[in-house]
Image (cartoon, rainbow, N blue to C red):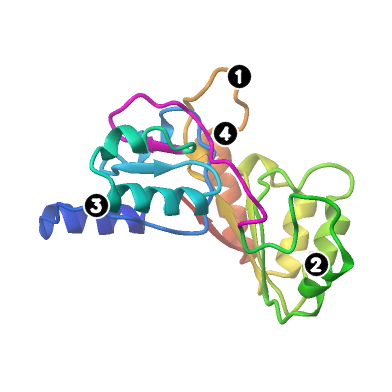
Amino acid sequence: MHTRRISNLLRNKHKYKELIFFDGPQISYAPKGILEQYSSQDTILFVGMQKMQWLISFNVIFKQKNQLSTLNMIQGLHIASTPDRATEALVDLDFSASPFQTSPPITNKQMGSNETSMVNDIAILDPTFNSGRSYLSVLDNLLKPRLGANFLTRFEMINKDFLERCEFSKNVVTLEFGAQNHYSCGTPGDKSIDNSKRIINVAKELTRRGIMFESR
């Protein structure tokens, strides 16, 4: 809600007319048309992993004249009030700050740089990582006292075992929920859209246990 308040102040109180860019750690895969409903004053909406889209967009905005038509062709970018193509950004892990490479094999040297570095913060960007039979053991390996851990997830993926692990390490854990969790509308058959009662109950339980979380 902070971004919406800032946007309202800039537009309505200060009468700022230029483009406003908000950046943050959240990655949203909201269904078609949802983000525009949630952020009615936004001009450009990024969907998926965003680093490449930022660079391409800035280049178009500041260097090209026919901006709108060019921006609309960028994968994972949606211009408000134009048809939503519902595309997601293409991901290039070689371009990102990641120890993993898209071109195999992953060598010992590439992985070693991550193990021996002074990394003190880790983020999991797969919103369904806390599923399947192995995720609790994965969590145990990730939740270390020296590491800050940010987990992108969904309200419907929260269960008792997951809550207990996060509560035990609540000093280092932050959960992040995307905008898609707040809507009952969306694509037919999309079960990732949870109802508001479920969201409220999970939020209350997270608060009761003292687990930090953010939601957009």
Q: CA distance from mark 3 to mark 2?
A: 39 Å
Label located before the other in sequence (2 or 4): 2
Label located before the other in sequence (3 or 2): 3
**Disc 4 designates what residue?**
194
Instruction: Provide the residue span drawn in magenta.
Output: 77-95
> Is there CB contact under 8 Å for labels 4 and 1?
no
Q: Nearer the viewer, mark 1 or mark 3?
A: 3
- In the picture shown, does residue 147 fall above or below 69? below
Residue drawn at point x = 76 percent, y = 60 percent: 164
In the structure shown, which secondary structural element does the residue marked by tag 2 occupy? helix
Give the residue type at disc 4. Asp
**Disc 1 designates what residue?**
189
Label located before the other in sequence (1 or 2): 2
Q: CA distance from mark 4 to mark 1?
A: 12 Å
- In the picture shown, does residue 96 fall above or below 30? below
Give the residue type at disc 2. Gln
Q: CA distance from mark 1 to mark 2?
A: 41 Å
Give the residue type at disc 1. Gly
Residue drawn at point x = 10 percent, y = 55 percent: 15
Label located before the other in sequence (3 or 4): 3
**Disc 3 designates what residue?**
19
Label located before the other in sequence (4 or 1): 1
